[in-house]
Image (tube, rainbow, N blue to C red):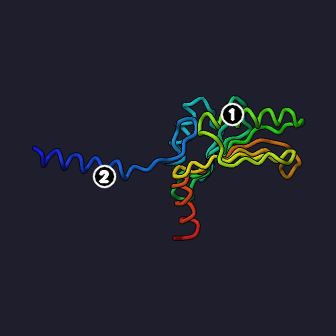
Amino acid sequence: MKRLLSIIFFELFVLIGNAQDHLKINGIAINGNIEDITEDLVATKLKKDNINGNIAMLYGMYGGYATDVIAIFSIPKQLIPFHITVSYPARNHFEELNKQYQDLKQFLTKEYGEPTTVSEDSEFEYNATFDLKELGTVELKMGINQLEHHFNSIDFSDKINTEKSEKAMFGE
């Protein structure tokens, strides 16, 4: 009996030790395949726009604000999601843009803890990074795009799947 229990505990230890944690958005792990994560996020009240190859597009509310687009990027051929970008509509006034940025930073701080780095020194270019070590990073940015529009965005990069995507891209 002791031997059987020892074997069971050893197997559980191995299974738990091999479990890999992934970064989450809306409580959904950035893992699996692009169709599954898209459907899981749709179940959290986001709306699906389309899936085109290794990119899925959604929209809806995130962090208390309507999004412009939520793009899920996956490893080509494998379709394993590794990066998600949440973009918000452009704002014309710094006060509106800054309020949204500060609200989103507070929302992300509740979700992921205090940001590891914050750069809010120059007007219209703010950045708060949440380095979640073994899970990946979340980066909130306020900036200006190529069309001179001012916007906020959040990038989610899952560490495990980003490493897989780099290996796939560089043929390792």
The x, y position of residue 165, in whole percent, is 56, 60
The x, y position of residue 33, in whole percent, is 50, 48
The x, y position of residue 15, in whole percent, is 32, 49
Residue 14 is marked as: 2
Front residue (pair 6, 92) = 6
The x, y position of residue 74, in whole percent, is 58, 53
Up/down of 172 relative to 9, above or below: below
40 vs 110, left or right, is: left
Secondary structure state at the residue bearing disc 1: helix
Front residue (pair 91, 80) = 91
Q: Amino acid at mark 2?
A: Val
Residue 41 is marked as: none
For the point 79% across and 44% down, the residue is: 142
Q: Quadrant of the N terminus?
A: top left
144 vs 156, left or right, is: right
Q: Residues within 10 Å of mark 1 (few under 14, many from 20)?
A: some
For the point 56% across and 57% down, the residue is: 162
Q: On the image, which quarter does residue 149 sit in?
A: top right
* Earlier sequence position, callout 1 versus callout 2: 2
Report the mark closest to the observer, 1 or 2: 1
For the point 69% across and 34% down, the residue is: 106
Secondary structure state at the residue bearing disc 2: helix
Q: Which residue is label 1 attached to?
A: 106
What is the C-alpha distance between the residues marked 1 and 2?
38 Å
Up/down of 142 relative to 169, above or below: above
19 vs 109, left or right, is: left
Q: Amino acid at mark 1?
A: Gln
The answer to the question of whether label 1 and label 2 lie on touching residues, with beta carbons closer than 8 A, is no
Q: Residues within 10 Å of mark 2 (few under 14, many from 20)?
A: few
Tally of marks: 2
